[in-house]
């Protein structure tokens, strides 16, 4: 979702959870983290495996779904929230033909995003 100069996104935190345990990244983080790199991934339907499809830099990552009043976040009368947001200048989405960066070294299962911060967990990407 784009709202003026901001973008808002969603990824399923996991198959059994509707929230993200932010304290795993930064102890005492509260309900949101700032200055986060969020990488979005998707399954490659033609060749299998998973590919990087885009990212948000310097994003805000929320521990749970945030409500949205935007008409762009509605489908058949139902409103959909978001779990992260960033400046539009800090967002990148690859066209399908350029999605050639593979995710190697494990499976994400149902989760379609991974994230890291510049704080204590600087070199850690959580998924």
Image (cartoon, rainbow, N blue to C red):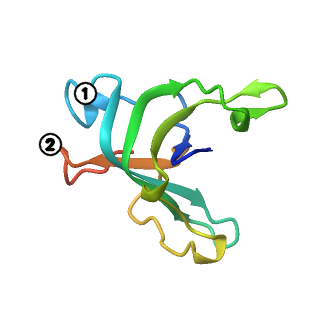
Q: Residue at x 51, y 48 (%)?
A: 5
Q: Residue at x 31, y 39 (%)?
A: 34
Coordinates of residue 97 in the picture (x, y in percent): 64, 77
Q: Quadrant of residue 78?
A: top right
Coordinates of residue 42 in the picture (x, y in percent): 58, 57
Asked if residue 46 is positioned above or below residue 53 in the image, the reply reads below
Asked if residue 113 is positioned above or below residue 50 in the image, the reply reads above
**Label ID, residue 98:** none
Give the residue at the far right of this rendering.
Answer: 76
Q: Is residue 44 left or right of residue 7?
A: right
At label 1, counting other C-alpha atoms closer than 10 Å, the crowd grade (few under 14, some 14-19, many 20 or more) is: some
**How far is mark 1 from mark 2, CA to CA?**
11 Å
Residue indicated by mark 1: 29
Q: Which element type, helix, strand or loop, lies under badge 2?
A: loop
Residue indicated by mark 2: 120
Q: Is residue 37 left or right of residue 97?
A: left
The N terminus is located in which quarter?
top right
């Amino acid at each position: 979702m784009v709202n003026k100069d901001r973008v808002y996104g969603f990824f399923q935190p996991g198959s059994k959870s509707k929230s993200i345990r932010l304290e795993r990244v930064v102890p005492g983080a509260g309900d949101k983290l700032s200055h986060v790199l969020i990488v979005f991934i998707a399954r490659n339907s033609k060749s299998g495996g998973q590919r990087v499809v885009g990212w948000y830099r310097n994003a805000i990552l929320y521990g749970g779904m945030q409500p949205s009043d935007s008409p762009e976040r509605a489908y058949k009368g139902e409103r959909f929230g978001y779990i992260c947001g960033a400046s539009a200048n800090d967002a990148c989405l690859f066209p399908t033909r350029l999605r050639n960066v593979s995710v190697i070294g494990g499976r994400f299962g149902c989760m379609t995003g991974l994230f890291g911060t510049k704080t204590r967990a600087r070199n850690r990407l959580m998924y």
